[in-house]
Image: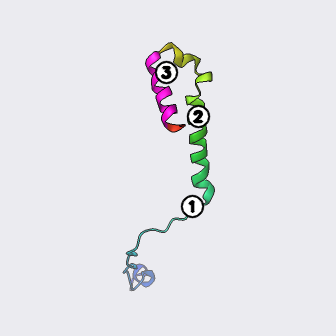
Amino acid sequence: MSALSRYAPSDTRTAPAPTSGVDIRLPWWAIVLPAVAFVALLLLILNPADGQTAAADPSVAHLLERARALLLP
C-alpha cells in the first residue's frame, strides 16, 4: 500500500448543491446609503442656481430642467 492511498479519502463524492437560490441578507444601510447618495448628487446636478456651466449650452440646460421638472413636481 502506498503512502498516497493511505491518506486518500475513501469517499470522494461531494454533497449535492442546494436547489434553492442563495440567501443573501444585506443590512438596511447597504441599500439606503447608496440611494440617498444618488438622490443627493442628482439634486446637486439638477439645481439650476448652481448650473452656470450648463447655461452656456442651451440644450443641456433644457434637458436638465426637464429632468428636474419630471422628478420634482
Q: Earlier in the sequence, mark 2 or mark 1?
A: 1
Give the residue type that dot 2 points to: Leu
Apparent side of residue 9 relative to residue 31 in the rendered image (left or right): left
Please tell me which residue lies in front, 68 or 35: 68
Apparent side of residue 65 relative to residue 40 in the rendered image (left or right): left
**Category of crowding for the residue at label 2, using alpha-carbon neighbours closer than 10 angstroms: few (below 14), some (14–19), many (at least 20):** some
Residue 17: numbered disc: none
By secondary structure, the bulk of the magenta-drawn segment is best described as helix
Asked if disc 2 and disc 1 are in contact, CB closer than 8 Å, the reply is: no
Q: Position of residue 10 (x, y in %)?
A: 39, 86
Element under label 1? loop
Cα separation between marks 2 and 3? 14 Å
In front of the other: label 1 or label 3? 3
Q: Position of residue 39 (x, y in %)?
A: 57, 41
Quickly name the residue at label 2: 43
- What's the residue at 61%, 58% (across, down)? 28
- What's the residue at 46%, 22% (across, down)? 62
Identify the colour scheme used: rainbow
Residue 61: numbered disc: 3
Quickly name the residue at label 1: 26
